[in-house]
Image (spheres, helix red, strand yellow):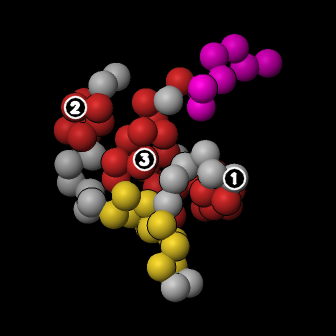
């Protein structure tokens, strides 16, 4: 998929997302989403005690093919 496609798919979401919203979009658990943020795989911004993920960072994460496991075992 392309950046334009993801922008179209995510058009209903705000420009910045909570980690919980990211987890819902990716259909993963909240702890896994926080893990992606903490390891730096998913870029984010920490503001005080809150972590936010710009929508464009989520799209870059989805576009990066090294984040995919092509042959699960």
Toward the viewer: 39 or 11?
A: 39
State whether residue 49 appears in this view. Answer: yes
Task: Determine whether label 3 and label 1 are within 8 Å by CB.
Answer: no
Residue identifier under label 1: 39
Mark toward the start of the polypeptide (2 vs 1): 2
Residue identifier under label 3: 58
Quadrant occupied by the C terminus: top right
Q: Residue at x 42, y 39 (%)?
A: 60
60 left or right, relative to 46: left
Binning the other alpha carbons within 10 Å of mark 1 as few (below 14), some (14 to 19) or many (20 upward) gives few
Q: Main secondary structure of the magenta part?
A: loop
Mark toward the start of the polypeptide (3 vs 1): 1
Residue identifier under label 2: 4
8 left or right, relative to 33: left
Q: In this view, does 42 lie above or below 48?
A: above
Toward the viewer: 45 or 15?
A: 45
Secondary structure of the residue carrying numbered label 3: helix
State whether residue 28 appears in this view. Answer: no
Span shown in magenta: 66-73
Quadrant occupied by the N terminus: top left
Q: Which residue is drawn at 69% across and 14% down?
A: 71
């Amino acid at each position: 998929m392309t950046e334009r496609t993801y922008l179209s798919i995510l058009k209903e979401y705000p420009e910045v997302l909570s980690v919980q919203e990211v987890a819902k979009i990716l259909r993963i658990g909240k702890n896994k989403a926080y893990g992606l943020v903490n390891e730096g795989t998913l870029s984010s911004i920490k503001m005080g005690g809150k972590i936010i993920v710009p929508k464009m960072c989520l799209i870059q994460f989805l576009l990066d093919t090294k984040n995919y496991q092509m042959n699960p075992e």
